[in-house]
Image (cartoon, rainbow, N blue to C red):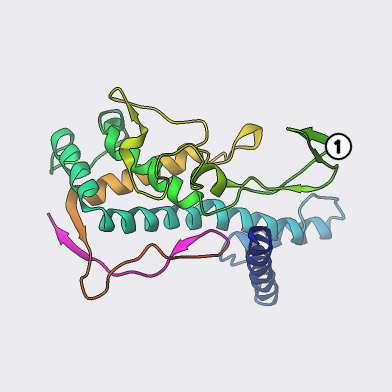
Amino acid sequence: MWYNLYVRSHTRIWEFLFKELEYHKKTHNPDAPRDVMDIYLNVIKSAEKEFVHESFSEEQLVALSMDMFMAGSETTSNTLSFCFLYLILYPEVQKKAQDEIDAVVGKIRVPSLDDRPKLPYVECIVLESLRMFSGRAFTVPHRSLKDTYLNGYLIPKDVTVIANLYGCMLEEDCGFEEPHIFRPERFIRDGKISVPENLIPFGFGKHRCLGETLARANVFLFIAAMLQKFTFCAVPQFPATLEWLDGVTPRTKPFRAVIKRR
């Protein structure tokens, strides 16, 4: 079931990107590039005119667009959506984070990465939000280069391998106590942040996501800045739920909130 959902969602985004490519080719003006697709098309056409063999191709352009879409705005924005949904549903978590921010940063200056070591609870909210988001997602597929045995199971050469992040982070026996409860303090041991080895929102091994450091920093700064200035509350007439939608990456169902200036 999960694999079929994965294939369907990726097929949809590939189709969308190929349509975008066709539109860009039809409306392309080499002297007025609008975005990275136009610039890439300029490089392709330049190589064709000079009869130079280049690695640049339309297929590579679509693959690049896919990488930018999935590893850029999509994943970060959806992580933040899950974060603020849970903060609305768990107001005590939000209050605890705000108290920490007030004590360390105050209400005048904007939180910075220099404050990060002194805001462990906010950092734990980042980790828990990544767990809740990525636990419903898939890693980038890999291909086995040769027949391999893992724990007695044969993984034949040239098969697609996808890590089961749900099993690692949200299954009942995954190692996280009450995994479906939003509990940032689960990452604090003896007053320090402790990250278990099965928290793998960015994958693992040599092909771990290169954007992990940037993504975690961005999510931290956004959460800290928002909670410093605002309180996010539920709307009684339109209660938020934990229902989520499948896609290239998972996302929350649209929900409403009252945002109050602190």
Magenta segment: does it hold 130?
Answer: no
- Left or right: 9 in relation to 131: right
In percent of width and height, residue 1 lies at 65, 62
Can residue 45 be seen in this snapshot?
A: yes
* Location of residue 38 with respect to 207 vertically, above or below: below
Give the quarter of the image for residue 255.
Answer: bottom left
Magenta segment: does it hold 250?
Answer: yes
Residue nearest the viewer, comparing 20 with 156 = 156
- Left or right: 259 in relation to 184: left
How many numbered badges does the structure rendering display? 1
Give the quarter of the image for residue 98.
Answer: top left
**Rendered residue at 53%/39% (across/down):** 200
- Left or right: 247 in relation to 21: left
The residue segment tinted magenta is: 248-262
Residue underneath mark 1: 147
Q: Main secondary structure of the magenta part?
A: loop
Q: Amino acid at mark 1?
A: Asp
Residue nearest the viewer, comparing 151 with 44 = 151
Can residue 201 be seen in this snapshot?
A: no
In percent of width and height, residue 102 lies at 14, 40
Residue nearest the viewer, comparing 114 with 241 = 241
Q: Residue furthest front?
A: 173
**Rendered residue at 30%/28% (across/down):** 117
**Rendered residue at 49%/54% (across/down):** 75
Residue nearest the viewer, comparing 62 with 75 = 75
**Rendered residue at 67%/67% (across/down):** 8
Q: Secondary structure at mark 1?
A: loop
In percent of width and height, residue 15 lies at 68, 71
